[in-house]
Image: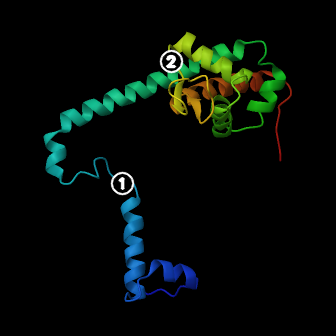
Amino acid sequence: MKLSISVPDDLWAEAAPADSSPSEVVQQALADMVSRRKPKSPWGRAPEPGVVEEYKESLDAVVHRLLSERKKLRSDGYRVGAVLAADTSMDLGWFMASVARLNPELLRAYITDAIAEEDPNEDLAKRIISLASDVAQLEAEWVGGDDEDPEDFKGGHHELPQEFLAGLVDALFDIWDVVERESSVSVKVSW
């Protein structure tokens, strides 16, 4: 394939050694891009097919175990979401502001950020962390900061698994979908 492209001089100078041809530089850049992509088939990173065949039983067992763990996290999150939604502080105003106006990914990101905030007094985050522990026996992981004193929030934060939070958010959206279906007024948000 023959291409005609424009590249800023400073980018070219940084990317291309003085003795290289433009074709060589572009081909190497494309090869690097391809190597960073995920394989299109399962076990695509195996050095040779024989390795996969030899260890197929082990590979299948670990995939099954990890998928089961992820499914449990999602189910636990859904259960916590149902209990959280029953809290009277999660009123119509909260659902309209947080569920009706956001998509699931944005709400999950909002909750993730609330849990990671340096201010441990965020009510929503505290309730979710507490419910995760009480309902799902899942402790928020302390990441970074002072391992000696997890109450010292400087330089670290709490995290819950994203699969768990996805289940929690799924429960909130399912609840809101039922409320929307049963109500005579639909909340449509346009920005």
Residue at mark 1: 40
Question: Between 85 and 130, which is closer to the camera in this rendering?
Answer: 130
Where residue 146 sits, quadrant-wise, is: top right
Near mark 2 (Cα within 10 A), the count class, few <14, some 14-19 or many ≥20, is: some
Q: Is residue 41 left or right of residue 30?
A: left
Give the residue furthest to the right: 185
Q: Is residue 187 above or below residue 134?
A: below
Q: Secondary structure at mark 1?
A: loop
Q: Is residue 187 left or right of residue 72?
A: right
Residue 138: x, y in percent?
A: 50, 18
Residue at mark 2: 138
Three-letter code for the amino acid on which mark 2 is drawn: Leu
For the point 49% across and 78% down, which residue is it? 14
Three-letter code for the amino acid on which mark 1 is drawn: Lys
Residue 109: x, y in percent?
A: 64, 37
Residue 107: x, y in percent?
A: 68, 35
Would residue 178 be visible to someone looking at this image? Answer: no
For the point 52% across and 32% down, which residue is it? 143
CB contact under 8 Å: marks 2 and 1: no
Which dot marks residue 26? Answer: none
Q: Secondary structure at mark 2?
A: loop
Give the quadrant of the N terminus: bottom left
Where residue 57 sits, quadrant-wise, is: top left
